[in-house]
Image: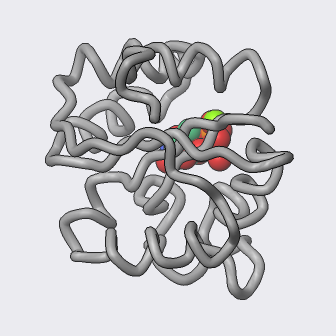
Amino acid sequence: MEQTFAVIKPDAFAAGLAGQILARIYEAGFSVVGLKKIWLSEAQAGGFYHEHQDKPFFADLTGFMSSGPCLVMVLEAPKAILQWRELMGATDPAAAAAGTLRRDFGTFIGRNAVHGSDAVETAAFEINYFFAGLELL
Ligand code: IDP
Ligand code: MG
């Protein structure tokens, strides 16, 4: 089994899409081993997205991620990291395949509804950034 870190971002949460997205997560066979609603500060969002701190979109990204509550999750499945990336679709909703979450629920690249870890190392960092071990059940 493998674990990945996922977020229902503030755009999707504010639009009332959390229930539909969670249904798609369960239909795809993931176990939800961690789940909580949080509202990040801009600094906390910056720590989460530190790999992008030199990108031109960093301020927009951290401003958006701290603009309202989101749901953070730890998902478990045999190949959870790749499987969740596939269910999310491409970063840009306009380029995401039909049937993916970003295609169905994203608006544009800066408001793309969901996040997922991209590798084993980033999943470990992101899970530990948001969850204590006792919260993973
Ligand atoms: P990912 O979320 O698919 O892993 P990353 O390249 O890690 O994509 O970028 C992190 C987030 O930053 C994206 O989900 C998206 O919301 C935002 N982002 C990435 N590239 C751009 C861009 O060119 N303009 C605006 N926002 C971007
Ligand atoms: Mg990424």
Relative to 135, say whether 98 is above or below: below
Q: Position of residue 130 (x, y in %)?
A: 38, 22
Relative to 134, say whether 93 is above or below: below
Image quadrant of ligand 2? Answer: top right
Q: How is the image coloured?
A: one colour
- 80 vs 26, left or right, is right
Residue name at image x 48 percent, y 61 percent? 112
Q: Position of residue 88 (x, y in %)?
A: 64, 63
Number of labels in the image equals 0
- 111 vs 116, left or right, is left
Camera-side residue: 89 or 20?
20
Image quadrant assignment for residue 129: top left
Q: Quadrant of the N terminus?
A: top right
Q: Position of residue 127 (x, y in %)?
A: 52, 23
Image quadrant assignment for residue 95: bottom right
Residue name at image x 16 percent, y 44 percent? 67
Residue name at image x 49 percent, y 56 percent? 114
Camera-side residue: 110 or 17?
17
Q: Position of residue 60 (x, y in %)?
A: 33, 38
- 65 vs 77, left or right, is left
Relative to 136, say whether 13 is above or below: below
